[in-house]
Amino acid sequence: MNKNGLIAVAVIFLLIIGMFFVVFTNNDTKIDDDSHKKDESGSDDETPPALGNITSFDEAVNAFNFDFYRKLCDNPANTGNIFYSPYSIFTALAMTYEGAKGLTAEEMKDVLHVDQSNDSFHLYMQSLYEYLNTNSKYNISTANALWVKENYELLQDYENIITTYYGGEATNIDFSDPVAAADTINQWVEDQTNNLIKDLVPAGAIDPVLTMLILTNAIYFKGNWEIQFDEQNTTEREFTKSDDSAIMVDTMSLVDTEDRFNYTENDDFQMLELPYSGGDISMIIMLPKDGRSVDDIISTIDKDDYAAWIDEMYDTELDIYLPKFKIETSYNLNDYLTNLGMTSAFNEMADFSGIFGDVDIFISDVIHKAFVEVNEEGTEAAAATAIIMAATAYPGIEEPARIVFDCDHPFLFTIHHKETNTILFMGTVEDPSVE
């Protein structure tokens, strides 16, 4: 190769080296820029912890909710008002599920719709727990506690999961005195629910010898409507119950205003969102149309329907009539959960070896109590769940001109966290006059 040829080759080689240098430098700069952006987004502020993309597990909570709700409504004894907290029940069961093994774990997985030891699910529960306890826009809180038989200890791995992801603390307690033990636990529940939930755990549910562990969850919420009802507009109006009998009830109203609310409807019902001040939590009301009933909605509703209907809502003006109501409920959930598929958990076939290790335990009772009051200012709601575990043996669209949303007959409602679409409370109003 002559001299000119060598020079040409050298020039090409230097150009190639230069191109690689530019590409590498740009990529390196991009990485640094991205890292800088990430640091900025993670800047310290006092806002509640964001749930980010950890939203898919609301489907587990909501799927469990609608499965459970149908079982609750199928019971002929539950013909009146219904109210409970799917979040509370789900959380208490999830803490129990963390220690389940074998068939018991498989059954609970099918009921709760989550895989055990799922890091993403743990992060979801942790983030939602932190959100509910640090959000200054609402008077809302939740708490978990484990009450462990005196002189026994939980497995360290299990206790670490409960502490880290559920914020739950374990306390040793003397179950040999059921009355004193129940008083201690019930006082904790009252303290966590602004004294609304009392006597959650009856002393008779505690076996002085066999009771090993009681898991408890409590949730409390008090929020003012973003657009409040004027007390002067509250009047007695007729409310027709499912049996076609009519009663007179105090009914709030927002009529002929320019206020706008999220709304949708289909052939079966109207759906309205009433936001609480702060914008993150709201009440969703599903009002059956003429010829339809609450049962028609219950028979088909699931998590996907619920999410789709919320997505279909649009902002509009409408006239609203909503009865004031207060509901207090108490449920033993054993049969409902067994009917959902949690069979082995309630008998001597249960495997909760991930909790104590060498002590065979099963669920003896799942108890739930709830309270809600809705008036012109807003809503106050609370609920608590206790799971009592015993040893199997002694242990060594186009906007319409005007819509009327008249809750003058039974309706469903939820109170949910909007960012994750997680249902915190749910109920049916069959008779607003009954407390």
Image (cartoon, rainbow, N blue to C red):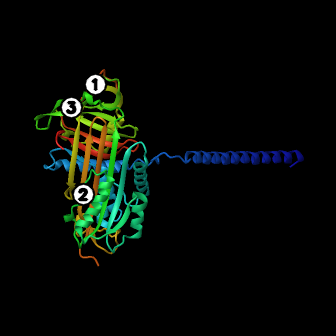
Give the CA distance from mark 1 to mark 3: 20 Å
Q: Residue at x 25, y 66 (%)?
A: 180
Callout 2 touching callout 1 (CB < 8 Å):
no
Around disc 1, counting alpha carbons within 10 Å, would you say few (fewer than 14), some (14 to 19), or many (20 or more)?
A: some
Q: Quadrant of the C terminus?
A: top left
Q: Earlier in the sequence, mark 3 or mark 2?
A: 2
* Amino acid type at mark 2: Leu
Any part of residue 242 in sight: yes
Around disc 2, counting alpha carbons within 10 Å, would you say few (fewer than 14), some (14 to 19), or many (20 or more)?
A: many
Q: Which mark is residue 156?
A: none
Around disc 3, counting alpha carbons within 10 Å, would you say few (fewer than 14), some (14 to 19), or many (20 or more)?
A: some
Q: Which residue is mark 1?
A: 255
* Amino acid type at mark 1: Val
Q: Is residue 136 above or below residue 153?
A: above
Q: Which mark is residue 289?
A: 3
Left or right for 45, reference 377 = right
Callout 1 touching callout 3 (CB < 8 Å):
no
Give the CA distance from mark 2 to mark 1: 41 Å
Instruction: Give the label, 3 or 2, closer to the camera.
Output: 2
Q: For the residue labelled by badge 1, is the local secondary structure a helix, a strand or a loop?
A: loop
Point out residue 266 in the picture as x, y percentages from the top left corner.
26, 32
Q: Which mark is residue 200?
A: 2
Q: Which of the two residues, 252 or 348, is positioned nearer the viewer here?
A: 252
* Amino acid type at mark 3: Lys
